[in-house]
Image (cartoon, rainbow, N blue to C red):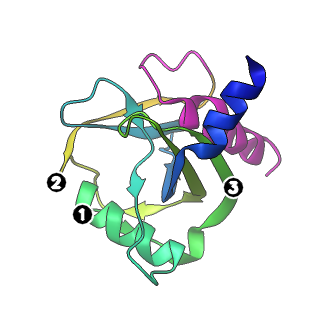
Amino acid sequence: MTSVATDAQHAAATIDIVAAVVLDARGRVLVVRKQGSDTFIQPGGKPEPGEAPLVALARELHEELGVILEPASAHALGRFEAWAVHEAGHRVRAHAFRVTVTGTPRPQAEIAELAWVPLQPPHGRRLAALSADHILPAAALAVATT
């Protein structure tokens, strides 16, 4: 059975995205929920063809939350992959950054809700595996070592 799952995993289409870890003054992390979903994810999205990761992230944060990314604040956390929560049968691979933003985040575009959750579990919200198992642990490690 393991080889079948592995074969299916390798056969799944992978969607490349950029993802943001935005912390507030209390050390909580911003997560968002798309309309029609009950799962929270990191803000971000798909880069357009030829778009650099931080340019894409700045665009997505402005479109989704109405905030401005401070480019000098960006620290790469790594690239992480998991099963997508919004595209059945697909994997999602995120280039994640810890960033600072200017402005007050508010739901816009396809975002239905935002929440500030603890960086460490329990998060108090249903989080996508990509966030809960990969991005937030990497962010917690980065915060602990700075």
Q: Distance of mark 3 from mark 1, alpha carbons?
A: 22 Å
- Give percent across and percent down for residue 133: 65, 30
Mark 1 burial class by Cα count in 10 Å: few <14, some 14-19, many 20+ = some
Mark 2 burial class by Cα count in 10 Å: few <14, some 14-19, many 20+ = few
Bounds of the magenta segment: 121-146
What is the three-letter code of the residue carrying label 2?
Answer: Ala
Viewer-closest of 50 and 97: 50
Task: Name the magenta segment's main secondary structure.
Answer: helix
SS of the residue under disc 2: loop
Q: Is residue 112 left or right of residue 122?
A: left
SS of the residue under disc 3: strand
Examine the image and state in which quarter residue 112 appears.
top left
Viewer-closest of 122 and 7: 7
- Look at 58% across and 52% down and name the residue there: 93
- Name the disc covering residue 112, or none: none
Viewer-closest of 19 and 51: 51
Residue at far bottom of view: 50
Mark 3 near mark 1, Cβ–Cβ under 8 Å?
no
- Look at 41% across and 19% down and name the residue there: 125
Residue 82 covered by magenta stretch: no
- Give percent across and percent down for residue 118: 53, 27
Q: Is residue 6 left or right of residue 20?
A: right
Q: Which residue is mark 3?
A: 77
Examine the image and state in which quarter residue 41 appears.
top left
Q: Which residue is mark 2?
A: 109
Q: Which residue is mark 1?
A: 63
Mark 3 burial class by Cα count in 10 Å: few <14, some 14-19, many 20+ = many
Earlier sequence position, callout 1 versus callout 2: 1
